[in-house]
Image: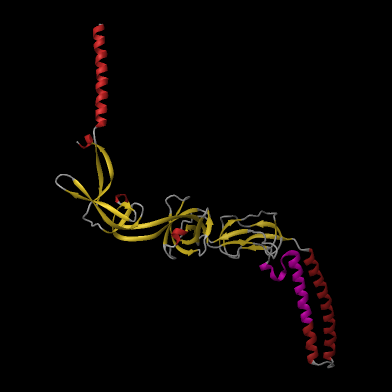
Protein backbone atom coordinates (compact mmCIF):
# COMPACT_ATOMS: atom_id res chain seq x y z
CA UNK A 1 0.00 0.00 0.00
CA UNK A 2 2.80 2.39 0.87
CA UNK A 3 4.49 1.55 -2.40
CA UNK A 4 1.41 2.61 -4.41
CA UNK A 5 1.05 5.83 -2.36
CA UNK A 6 4.63 6.79 -3.12
CA UNK A 7 4.06 6.19 -6.82
CA UNK A 8 0.95 8.40 -6.82
CA UNK A 9 2.77 11.25 -5.04
CA UNK A 10 5.68 10.98 -7.44
CA UNK A 11 3.28 11.11 -10.42
CA UNK A 12 1.59 14.25 -9.07
CA UNK A 13 4.93 15.97 -8.54
CA UNK A 14 5.95 15.03 -12.09
CA UNK A 15 2.73 16.42 -13.51
CA UNK A 16 3.18 19.72 -11.65
CA UNK A 17 6.75 19.97 -12.88
CA UNK A 18 5.80 19.20 -16.49
CA UNK A 19 2.87 21.67 -16.41
CA UNK A 20 5.06 24.46 -15.04
CA UNK A 21 7.73 23.77 -17.67
CA UNK A 22 5.13 23.80 -20.48
CA UNK A 23 3.63 27.09 -19.25
CA UNK A 24 7.01 28.82 -19.03
CA UNK A 25 8.01 27.49 -22.44
CA UNK A 26 4.76 28.76 -23.95
CA UNK A 27 5.24 32.23 -22.45
CA UNK A 28 8.82 32.44 -23.71
CA UNK A 29 7.91 31.80 -27.34
CA UNK A 30 8.31 34.83 -29.66
CA UNK A 31 5.20 36.88 -30.51
CA UNK A 32 4.38 38.17 -33.92
CA UNK A 33 3.52 41.86 -34.42
CA UNK A 34 0.50 42.36 -36.65
CA UNK A 35 -0.74 45.72 -37.89
CA UNK A 36 -4.26 46.85 -38.66
CA UNK A 37 -4.85 47.96 -42.24
CA UNK A 38 -6.90 50.81 -43.65
CA UNK A 39 -8.04 51.75 -47.13
CA UNK A 40 -8.46 55.49 -47.87
CA UNK A 41 -12.04 56.53 -48.58
CA UNK A 42 -13.96 59.64 -49.56
CA UNK A 43 -16.14 61.17 -46.89
CA UNK A 44 -17.25 64.43 -45.33
CA UNK A 45 -15.11 65.65 -42.44
CA UNK A 46 -16.44 68.20 -40.01
CA UNK A 47 -14.62 69.94 -37.20
CA UNK A 48 -17.15 70.77 -34.50
CA UNK A 49 -17.17 72.28 -31.05
CA UNK A 50 -19.63 72.00 -28.18
CA UNK A 51 -20.73 75.12 -26.31
CA UNK A 52 -22.57 74.98 -23.00
CA UNK A 53 -25.20 77.56 -22.20
CA UNK A 54 -28.87 78.15 -21.44
CA UNK A 55 -32.18 78.53 -23.21
CA UNK A 56 -33.98 81.78 -22.43
CA UNK A 57 -36.65 84.04 -23.95
CA UNK A 58 -35.49 86.78 -26.26
CA UNK A 59 -37.78 89.25 -24.50
CA UNK A 60 -38.46 88.79 -20.79
CA UNK A 61 -40.45 91.69 -19.32
CA UNK A 62 -40.93 92.67 -15.68
CA UNK A 63 -44.42 94.09 -15.16
CA UNK A 64 -44.40 96.84 -12.49
CA UNK A 65 -47.12 99.04 -10.97
CA UNK A 66 -47.66 102.67 -11.89
CA UNK A 67 -48.59 103.55 -8.31
CA UNK A 68 -47.62 102.46 -4.80
CA UNK A 69 -50.08 100.39 -2.81
CA UNK A 70 -51.04 96.95 -1.53
CA UNK A 71 -51.86 93.88 -3.65
CA UNK A 72 -55.53 93.08 -3.12
CA UNK A 73 -56.03 90.40 -5.78
CA UNK A 74 -53.97 88.23 -8.12
CA UNK A 75 -55.84 87.14 -11.23
CA UNK A 76 -53.11 85.04 -12.86
CA UNK A 77 -50.65 82.31 -11.89
CA UNK A 78 -47.20 81.34 -13.20
CA UNK A 79 -47.43 79.20 -16.32
CA UNK A 80 -50.64 80.78 -17.58
CA UNK A 81 -50.87 82.56 -20.91
CA UNK A 82 -51.61 86.28 -20.83
CA UNK A 83 -52.46 88.75 -23.59
CA UNK A 84 -51.16 92.28 -23.86
CA UNK A 85 -53.34 94.58 -21.75
CA UNK A 86 -54.85 91.73 -19.72
CA UNK A 87 -55.13 92.39 -15.97
CA UNK A 88 -52.71 90.39 -13.80
CA UNK A 89 -53.32 91.96 -10.38
CA UNK A 90 -55.20 94.69 -8.54
CA UNK A 91 -53.64 97.24 -6.19
CA UNK A 92 -55.20 99.28 -3.41
CA UNK A 93 -53.68 102.74 -3.36
CA UNK A 94 -51.85 104.13 -0.35
CA UNK A 95 -51.87 107.86 -1.08
CA UNK A 96 -48.82 109.99 -0.49
CA UNK A 97 -49.79 112.57 2.11
CA UNK A 98 -47.97 115.40 0.36
CA UNK A 99 -49.63 114.65 -2.98
CA UNK A 100 -53.01 114.20 -1.29
CA UNK A 101 -52.76 117.55 0.47
CA UNK A 102 -51.75 119.26 -2.77
CA UNK A 103 -54.63 117.65 -4.68
CA UNK A 104 -57.19 118.68 -2.02
CA UNK A 105 -55.84 122.24 -2.09
CA UNK A 106 -56.20 122.29 -5.86
CA UNK A 107 -59.84 121.18 -5.57
CA UNK A 108 -60.65 123.94 -3.08
CA UNK A 109 -58.92 126.60 -5.19
CA UNK A 110 -60.69 125.44 -8.37
CA UNK A 111 -64.04 125.56 -6.53
CA UNK A 112 -63.39 129.19 -5.49
CA UNK A 113 -62.41 130.15 -9.03
CA UNK A 114 -65.47 128.39 -10.49
CA UNK A 115 -67.80 130.17 -8.06
CA UNK A 116 -66.33 133.53 -9.02
CA UNK A 117 -66.52 132.68 -12.75
CA UNK A 118 -70.19 131.76 -12.41
CA UNK A 119 -70.96 135.12 -10.74
CA UNK A 120 -69.08 137.03 -13.43
CA UNK A 121 -70.90 135.13 -16.14
CA UNK A 122 -74.33 135.78 -14.60
CA UNK A 123 -73.52 139.50 -14.33
CA UNK A 124 -72.26 139.70 -17.91
CA UNK A 125 -75.25 137.76 -19.19
CA UNK A 126 -77.64 140.26 -17.66
CA UNK A 127 -75.71 143.19 -19.08
CA UNK A 128 -75.46 141.51 -22.49
CA UNK A 129 -79.22 141.01 -22.63
CA UNK A 130 -79.63 144.76 -21.94
CA UNK A 131 -77.18 145.55 -24.74
CA UNK A 132 -74.81 147.17 -22.24
CA UNK A 133 -71.74 145.00 -23.09
CA UNK A 134 -70.44 143.90 -26.43
CA UNK A 135 -70.60 140.40 -27.74
CA UNK A 136 -66.81 140.18 -27.51
CA UNK A 137 -66.77 140.96 -23.77
CA UNK A 138 -69.55 138.47 -23.14
CA UNK A 139 -67.71 135.69 -25.03
CA UNK A 140 -64.59 136.28 -22.92
CA UNK A 141 -66.64 135.86 -19.75
CA UNK A 142 -68.23 132.65 -21.04
CA UNK A 143 -64.80 131.32 -22.01
CA UNK A 144 -63.50 132.00 -18.50
CA UNK A 145 -66.44 130.09 -17.05
CA UNK A 146 -65.70 127.06 -19.24
CA UNK A 147 -62.06 127.12 -18.22
CA UNK A 148 -63.00 127.28 -14.54
CA UNK A 149 -65.40 124.33 -14.98
CA UNK A 150 -62.71 122.31 -16.75
CA UNK A 151 -60.16 123.09 -14.04
CA UNK A 152 -62.60 122.01 -11.34
CA UNK A 153 -63.23 118.68 -13.14
CA UNK A 154 -59.50 118.10 -13.61
CA UNK A 155 -58.84 118.87 -9.95
CA UNK A 156 -61.53 116.39 -8.87
CA UNK A 157 -60.03 113.71 -11.15
CA UNK A 158 -56.53 114.36 -9.82
CA UNK A 159 -57.76 114.01 -6.24
CA UNK A 160 -59.51 110.73 -7.04
CA UNK A 161 -56.38 109.37 -8.72
CA UNK A 162 -54.15 110.30 -5.78
CA UNK A 163 -56.64 109.01 -3.20
CA UNK A 164 -58.12 105.98 -5.00
CA UNK A 165 -55.84 105.35 -7.96
CA UNK A 166 -58.73 105.77 -10.38
CA UNK A 167 -61.13 108.48 -11.44
CA UNK A 168 -64.53 108.41 -13.10
CA UNK A 169 -63.14 109.79 -16.35
CA UNK A 170 -60.38 107.15 -16.74
CA UNK A 171 -61.84 104.11 -15.01
CA UNK A 172 -60.96 101.84 -17.97
CA UNK A 173 -57.28 102.81 -17.69
CA UNK A 174 -57.06 102.63 -13.94
CA UNK A 175 -53.53 102.48 -12.54
CA UNK A 176 -54.82 100.16 -9.80
CA UNK A 177 -55.18 97.44 -12.44
CA UNK A 178 -51.78 95.93 -13.24
CA UNK A 179 -51.84 94.90 -16.89
CA UNK A 180 -49.40 92.83 -18.92
CA UNK A 181 -47.36 94.89 -21.35
CA UNK A 182 -46.79 91.98 -23.77
CA UNK A 183 -48.45 88.73 -24.80
CA UNK A 184 -46.80 85.55 -23.57
CA UNK A 185 -46.50 83.17 -20.63
CA UNK A 186 -46.18 84.28 -17.03
CA UNK A 187 -42.85 82.92 -15.79
CA UNK A 188 -43.07 84.18 -12.22
CA UNK A 189 -45.26 86.20 -9.86
CA UNK A 190 -42.96 87.10 -6.94
CA UNK A 191 -45.64 88.93 -4.88
CA UNK A 192 -48.59 87.76 -2.80
CA UNK A 193 -51.89 89.29 -1.80
CA UNK A 194 -51.19 91.79 0.98
CA UNK A 195 -47.66 92.66 -0.17
CA UNK A 196 -46.81 96.34 -0.43
CA UNK A 197 -45.57 97.46 -3.84
CA UNK A 198 -44.02 100.68 -5.10
CA UNK A 199 -43.88 102.21 -8.53
CA UNK A 200 -40.68 102.77 -10.47
CA UNK A 201 -39.13 106.21 -10.06
CA UNK A 202 -35.80 108.02 -10.00
CA UNK A 203 -34.75 106.47 -6.70
CA UNK A 204 -35.77 102.81 -7.14
CA UNK A 205 -36.64 100.25 -9.79
CA UNK A 206 -40.08 99.51 -8.39
CA UNK A 207 -41.65 96.21 -7.38
CA UNK A 208 -41.98 93.46 -9.99
CA UNK A 209 -45.54 92.13 -10.05
CA UNK A 210 -44.94 89.50 -12.73
CA UNK A 211 -42.36 88.34 -15.26
CA UNK A 212 -43.81 87.67 -18.72
CA UNK A 213 -42.03 86.26 -21.78
CA UNK A 214 -42.87 85.08 -25.27
CA UNK A 215 -41.86 81.39 -25.12
CA UNK A 216 -42.23 81.04 -28.89
CA UNK A 217 -39.21 83.30 -29.42
CA UNK A 218 -36.27 81.69 -27.61
CA UNK A 219 -32.52 82.09 -27.87
CA UNK A 220 -29.52 80.01 -26.82
CA UNK A 221 -26.93 82.01 -24.91
CA UNK A 222 -23.44 80.63 -24.27
CA UNK A 223 -19.71 81.40 -24.38
CA UNK A 224 -17.03 80.23 -26.80
CA UNK A 225 -13.26 80.27 -26.31
CA UNK A 226 -11.15 82.87 -28.11
CA UNK A 227 -9.26 80.11 -29.97
CA UNK A 228 -12.45 79.11 -31.79
CA UNK A 229 -14.45 82.32 -32.10
CA UNK A 230 -12.52 83.39 -35.21
CA UNK A 231 -13.95 80.43 -37.13
CA UNK A 232 -17.57 81.41 -36.49
CA UNK A 233 -19.80 83.35 -38.84
CA UNK A 234 -23.22 84.89 -38.32
CA UNK A 235 -25.93 82.70 -39.81
CA UNK A 236 -24.26 79.29 -39.41
CA UNK A 237 -26.62 76.48 -38.31
CA UNK A 238 -26.36 74.89 -34.88
CA UNK A 239 -27.81 71.85 -33.14
CA UNK A 240 -29.17 72.46 -29.63
CA UNK A 241 -29.44 69.57 -27.19
CA UNK A 242 -31.34 70.17 -23.96
CA UNK A 243 -30.10 68.02 -21.10
CA UNK A 244 -33.48 67.82 -19.39
CA UNK A 245 -35.19 66.62 -22.57
CA UNK A 246 -33.66 63.31 -23.61
CA UNK A 247 -33.39 62.60 -27.33
CA UNK A 248 -34.62 66.10 -28.16
CA UNK A 249 -32.67 68.31 -30.56
CA UNK A 250 -33.54 71.75 -31.84
CA UNK A 251 -32.22 73.62 -34.85
CA UNK A 252 -30.78 77.07 -34.24
CA UNK A 253 -29.08 79.84 -36.20
CA UNK A 254 -26.17 81.89 -34.87
CA UNK A 255 -27.18 85.55 -34.84
CA UNK A 256 -24.79 87.32 -32.45
CA UNK A 257 -21.09 87.15 -31.53
CA UNK A 258 -19.93 89.55 -28.84
CA UNK A 259 -17.23 91.97 -30.03
CA UNK A 260 -15.71 92.00 -26.55
CA UNK A 261 -14.31 89.13 -24.49
CA UNK A 262 -14.96 88.44 -20.83
CA UNK A 263 -12.48 86.58 -18.64
CA UNK A 264 -13.66 83.31 -17.10
CA UNK A 265 -11.32 81.06 -15.10
CA UNK A 266 -8.31 82.70 -16.69
CA UNK A 267 -9.56 82.25 -20.28
CA UNK A 268 -11.09 84.81 -22.63
CA UNK A 269 -14.65 83.91 -23.59
CA UNK A 270 -16.96 85.53 -26.15
CA UNK A 271 -20.73 85.48 -25.69
CA UNK A 272 -22.85 84.14 -28.53
CA UNK A 273 -26.60 84.06 -29.12
CA UNK A 274 -28.58 81.83 -31.46
CA UNK A 275 -32.24 81.85 -32.44
CA UNK A 276 -33.83 78.52 -31.51
CA UNK A 277 -36.46 76.94 -33.77
CA UNK A 278 -39.12 75.98 -31.22
CA UNK A 279 -41.38 73.02 -31.91
CA UNK A 280 -45.12 73.12 -31.35
CA UNK A 281 -45.01 70.73 -28.37
CA UNK A 282 -44.13 73.56 -25.98
CA UNK A 283 -41.94 71.34 -23.78
CA UNK A 284 -38.96 73.67 -23.72
CA UNK A 285 -38.77 76.01 -20.71
CA UNK A 286 -36.84 79.11 -19.77
CA UNK A 287 -33.52 78.45 -18.04
CA UNK A 288 -32.90 74.92 -19.38
CA UNK A 289 -29.20 74.04 -19.58
CA UNK A 290 -28.25 73.14 -23.13
CA UNK A 291 -25.33 72.24 -25.38
CA UNK A 292 -24.86 73.72 -28.83
CA UNK A 293 -22.92 71.89 -31.53
CA UNK A 294 -21.37 74.19 -34.14
CA UNK A 295 -19.49 73.18 -37.28
CA UNK A 296 -16.29 75.24 -37.29
CA UNK A 297 -14.94 73.87 -40.57
CA UNK A 298 -15.98 71.29 -43.15
CA UNK A 299 -14.44 69.37 -46.05
CA UNK A 300 -16.78 67.46 -48.34
CA UNK A 301 -15.98 64.16 -50.08
CA UNK A 302 -12.23 64.28 -49.48
CA UNK A 303 -9.72 61.42 -49.32
CA UNK A 304 -9.30 60.45 -45.69
CA UNK A 305 -7.87 57.81 -43.40
CA UNK A 306 -8.16 57.19 -39.65
CA UNK A 307 -5.93 59.62 -37.77
CA UNK A 308 -4.37 56.66 -35.92
CA UNK A 309 -2.61 55.72 -39.20
CA UNK A 310 -0.72 59.02 -39.31
CA UNK A 311 2.82 59.40 -37.99
CA UNK A 312 3.61 62.95 -36.88
CA UNK A 313 7.25 63.99 -37.00
CA UNK A 314 7.81 67.67 -36.31
CA UNK A 315 5.95 69.62 -38.97
CA UNK A 316 5.79 66.61 -41.30
CA UNK A 317 3.28 63.76 -41.49
CA UNK A 318 3.81 60.23 -42.82
CA UNK A 319 1.89 57.02 -43.47
CA UNK A 320 3.15 53.50 -44.09
CA UNK A 321 1.85 52.25 -47.42
CA UNK A 322 1.49 48.46 -47.63
CA UNK A 323 3.33 46.71 -50.45
CA UNK A 324 2.48 43.00 -50.74
CA UNK A 325 5.24 40.71 -51.96
CA UNK A 326 5.53 36.95 -52.41
CA UNK A 327 7.38 36.54 -49.11
CA UNK A 328 5.88 39.05 -46.72
CA UNK A 329 4.31 42.46 -46.44
CA UNK A 330 6.51 45.53 -46.57
CA UNK A 331 5.67 49.02 -45.40
CA UNK A 332 6.91 52.06 -47.31
CA UNK A 333 7.10 55.26 -45.26
CA UNK A 334 5.41 57.91 -47.39
CA UNK A 335 5.11 61.64 -46.73
CA UNK A 336 1.55 63.02 -46.98
CA UNK A 337 -0.08 66.43 -46.75
CA UNK A 338 -2.95 66.42 -44.26
CA UNK A 339 -5.91 68.73 -43.93
CA UNK A 340 -8.95 68.89 -41.70
CA UNK A 341 -9.42 66.41 -38.86
CA UNK A 342 -12.51 65.57 -36.82
CA UNK A 343 -10.50 63.74 -34.17
CA UNK A 344 -11.17 60.32 -35.74
CA UNK A 345 -10.52 60.72 -39.46
CA UNK A 346 -8.16 63.12 -41.17
CA UNK A 347 -8.13 64.59 -44.67
CA UNK A 348 -5.26 63.59 -46.99
CA UNK A 349 -4.62 66.36 -49.49
CA UNK A 350 -1.58 64.81 -51.14
CA UNK A 351 0.40 61.55 -51.03
CA UNK A 352 -2.33 58.85 -51.11
CA UNK A 353 -4.85 57.47 -53.55
CA UNK A 354 -7.98 55.43 -53.01
CA UNK A 355 -6.14 52.34 -54.32
CA UNK A 356 -3.48 52.41 -51.59
CA UNK A 357 -3.57 50.56 -48.31
CA UNK A 358 -1.96 51.98 -45.21
CA UNK A 359 -0.72 50.47 -41.99
CA UNK A 360 -2.57 51.21 -38.77
CA UNK A 361 -1.72 50.66 -35.10
CA UNK A 362 -0.02 47.48 -33.96
CA UNK A 363 -2.02 44.41 -32.93
CA UNK A 364 0.02 42.13 -30.64
CA UNK A 365 -0.89 38.48 -31.13
CA UNK A 366 0.58 35.15 -30.02
CA UNK A 367 2.27 32.97 -32.64
CA UNK A 368 0.05 30.05 -31.69
CA UNK A 369 -3.06 32.14 -32.38
CA UNK A 370 -1.93 32.52 -35.98
CA UNK A 371 -1.52 28.76 -36.46
Q: Residue at x 53, y 57 (%)?
A: 263
Q: Could you say where residue 302 lies in the image, as x and y percent from the top left?
A: 29, 59
Is residue 245 left or right of 82 when viewed as pictured? left
| Residue situated furthest top in the rendering | 1
**Badge count:** 0
Q: Is residue 279 visible?
A: no
Q: Could you say where residue 318 lies in the image, as x and y percent from the top left?
A: 28, 53
Asked whether residue 225 is drawn in magenta, I would say no
Is residue 288 left or right of 163 when viewed as pictured? left
Q: Residue at x 51, y 53 (%)?
A: 288
Asked whether residue 172 is drawn in magenta, I would say yes
Q: Could you say where residue 88 lies in the image, as x and y percent from the top left?
A: 62, 60
Rendered-image quadrant of the C terminus: top left
Rendered-image quadrant of the N terminus: top left
144 shown above or below 45? below
Q: Residue at x 43, y 53 (%)?
A: 248
Q: Main secondary structure of the magenta part?
A: helix
Q: Could you say where residue 223 lies in the image, as x and y percent from the top left?
A: 49, 57
Q: Is residue 186 visible?
A: yes
Q: Nearer the viewer, residue 244 or 228?
A: 228
Q: Nearer the viewer, residue 238 or 285?
A: 238
Q: Nearer the viewer, residue 50 or 306?
A: 306
Is residue 202 left or right of 293 when viewed as pictured? right
The quadrant in which residue 76 appears is bottom right
Q: Residue at x 21, y 37 (%)?
A: 370
Q: Nearer the viewer, residue 220 or 334?
A: 334
The quadrant in which residue 111 appears is bottom right
Residue range in magenta is 145-173
| Residue situated furthest front in the rendering | 314
The quadrant in which residue 6 appears is top left
Amino acid sequence: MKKYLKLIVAALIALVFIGTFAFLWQKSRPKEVVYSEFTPSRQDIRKTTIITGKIEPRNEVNVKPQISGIITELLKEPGQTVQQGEVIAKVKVIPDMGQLSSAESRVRLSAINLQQAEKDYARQLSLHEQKLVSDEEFEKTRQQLRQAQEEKAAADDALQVVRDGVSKSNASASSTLIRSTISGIILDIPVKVGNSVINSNTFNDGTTIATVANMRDLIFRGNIDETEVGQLQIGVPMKITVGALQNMQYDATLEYISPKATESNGANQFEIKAAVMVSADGKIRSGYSANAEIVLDEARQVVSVPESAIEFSGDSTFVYVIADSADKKTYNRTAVVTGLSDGVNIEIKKGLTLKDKVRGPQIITDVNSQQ
